Every structure is written in structure tokens, then in C-alpha cells.
Amino acid sequence: MEQAVLKRKDKGVERVLIEADAVQQRVRELAAELDRIYVHETPLLIGVLTGAITFMTDLMREMDAELKVDFMAVSSYGDQVTSSGAVRILKDLNENIEGRHVLMVEDIVDSGLTLQYLLDVLQRRDPADIKVVALLRKPKAEALAVQTDLVGFDIPDEFVIGYGLDYAGRYRNLPYIGVLDPAEIEVTKSKTAILSQTPPLQDQ
Ligand code: PRP
């Protein structure tokens, strides 16, 4: 990124993929579409922690429909850059979804495996229906035809960060969607290698 606009939190961003204004504009459009879908219903918006927090809070404030919110936390096994597809529920819903109109809110559908797993789990709880809104979708998920009723942006298969999305827990507070500088992955890997070679602290 250009040096003149570089803030501390921008460091490690190779380039901006979707500007903050464009993200906000698309969120407003998605909210308007959802208001048209849920004219008579009170949907339960389910956010998948942690990445979906920013999208969820912006989306719900743009929506006019009466709605409720709940969150799930899942953990996918694998390294930090790719997802292995094995999913474990770390925090389940507070709400009973039987007979409810559920709207899954995802920041990104990459391989689609997390979403597919969650859809299978939630369908077994007999909701009236489940829809999915994802801010970002990568080509793999599109090819696998994972259910995504509304998509903000179809993006190329690059490692994206910002607007809730992280790399190693960082960058969630960027207001735009950026592409991670591959050099940052190398830096983090070598830092991890150095740390793992460091002998553990002795008891005092
Ligand atoms: C991200 C994202 C989705 C999932 C998508 O979560 O929020 O839930 O990966 O990947 P998939 O389509 O390949 O399954 P992540 O596991 O990185 O956790 P986080 O939301 O806490 O960052």
C-alpha cells in the first residue's frame, strides 16, 4: 500500500480489494433485499464468530425488519491460511430455532465446508427455513454449490483480511477488505519457528 496513507493497522496489507465505502454500500443493498424477504417474519440472525461480527452489526443496523440475533462459535482444524473442513462447535446457540426463520450471516465462504457443516446441524433442529447471507464468496464455494442465498461480493482466491476477517487474529479492525501481503505469512511463520526453538522458561 502507498506509504502516505499507511496506518499502523494497514501494515502487512498488500492492496485494498474492496474499499470501505463499497463495503458499506453493498451492506445497505443486502439489508434492503433482506427487508423485502422478511416483510412479515421475524428472522433470527445467526452470526458465526468471530469473523462475522463486523458484517453482522452493520447489516442488522441497516435492516428495518423486526429481528433477533444469536451467535455460534466454531473451530476449524488446519493451519492459519487454509481450512481443513473438520468443524467443532465451541459455542452453540442460546435460542431454540424450531419453527423459526433463520438467517445465517457469514463473513466469508471459502471452501464452504464450515457453512455446509453448520447448515446440516441447524437443519436437523427443524427451523421453518434457513437462508444464508455471505459478504464474500470464493470460487471454490461457488463451484461446490454451497447454499448462499445472498452474496455481497464474489472474490478471487486470495487471502483476504479486514472488516472482521483476520490473519493470526490480527487485521479484523480494518474498515476495508484487503489482500494480505504474502511476505507477512513468511514473517509470521519464521517468528513462530523462532518461538518454538526458544527453550521454555525455567521455574524461578
Ligand atoms: C472463517 C470464516 C468462516 C470460515 C470459512 O472463519 O469466518 O466461518 O472461515 O471457511 P470455509 O468456507 O473454508 O469453511 P475462521 O475459521 O477463520 O475463524 P474466525 O471467524 O474466528 O476468523
Image (spheres, grey):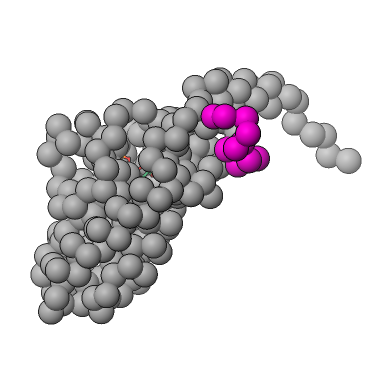
Residue lying at 17% horizontally and 36% vertically, measured from the top left: 142
Q: State yes or no: residue 122 in magenta.
A: no
- The quarter of the image holding the N terminus is top right
Front position in the image: 157 or 61:
61
Name the spot of residue 17 as percent of width and height, x first.
39, 35
Residue lying at 40% horizontally and 46% vertically, measured from the top left: 75
Q: Is residue 159 above or below residue 190?
A: below
Residue lying at 16% horizontally and 42% vertically, measured from the top left: 146
- For the question of whether residue 144 can be seen, the reply is yes
Magenta span: 1-10
Q: Quadrant of ligand 1?
A: top left
**Dominant secondary-structure state across the stretch colored magenta:** helix
Q: State yes or no: residue 6 in magenta.
A: yes
Name the spot of residue 10 as percent of width and height, x first.
57, 38
Front position in the image: 82 or 16:
16
Q: Is residue 137 above or below residue 182?
A: below
Residue 102 occupies quadrant: bottom left
